[in-house]
Image (tube, rainbow, N blue to C red):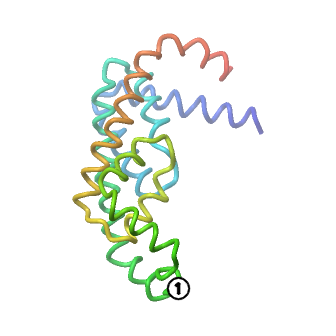
Amino acid sequence: MIASLKRRVRALAERCARLAQARHGPLLLGLIAFAATWSFTVAVGPFLSAFCVGAPRRWWRFALAANVSTACAAVTVIWALQAGVAPWIADQFPALMASPQWLRLHAWVDAWGLAAMLAWLALPVPQAPFVLVVGVLGIGPAQVLIAFLIGKGCKYTVTAWLAARASQAMQPGVQRYLN
């Protein structure tokens, strides 16, 4: 099982390195970031890091592609939640919407707004709960877009820069681990 997982990780890392060197590498990473954000399946950070290790000189393009794609995906998720899921939750679970915890969360987001969103998005924590709560609370798509562009922009810029700078030093260790 471990050997199979190592082979899969090695194959994915090699594929990301090849894609990173392709002419349309940033676009490909952007598509991956959009799909990952929309589906809540995997984090974008490891893909961003792998692409930056594969083509360290293009680190800022990869950071920009991941950031814009993630922000666009989040806005579409928020729109879908607000159009369909939030009203359904309110109808199906009226006690949840009236609970002290929900009201406290709503008050917290109302009080801190953009600052709370920026802080959450810059942290290395899963964004799925954040997106779901913000969508159900009815935060506007423009605020979500700004928060993602700034919060994730900071996070992805640092991640990409570190991965690009460390890529030469990491190569022997990564190869030793994968072999």
Measured as percent of width and height from the top left, residue 80 is found at 34, 70
Regarding mark 1 in the picture, which secondary structure is present there? helix
Specify whether 170 is left or right of 140: right
Specify whether 169 is left or right of 77: right
Q: Quadrant of residue 25?
A: top left
Residue topped by disc 1 = 95
- 150 or 27: nearer the eye? 150
- 9 or 140: nearer the eye? 140
The residue depicted at 74 percent of the width and 32 percent of the height is 3
Q: Residues within 10 Å of mark 1 (few under 14, many from 20)?
A: few
The residue depicted at 33 percent of the width and 55 percent of the height is 73
- 24 or 151: nearer the eye? 151
Is 70 located above or below residue 8 in the figure? Answer: below
What kind of residue is marked 1? Answer: Ala
Specify whether 24 is left or right of 4: left
Specify whether 93 is left or right of 178: left
Quadrant placement of the N terminus: top right
- 22 or 75: nearer the eye? 75
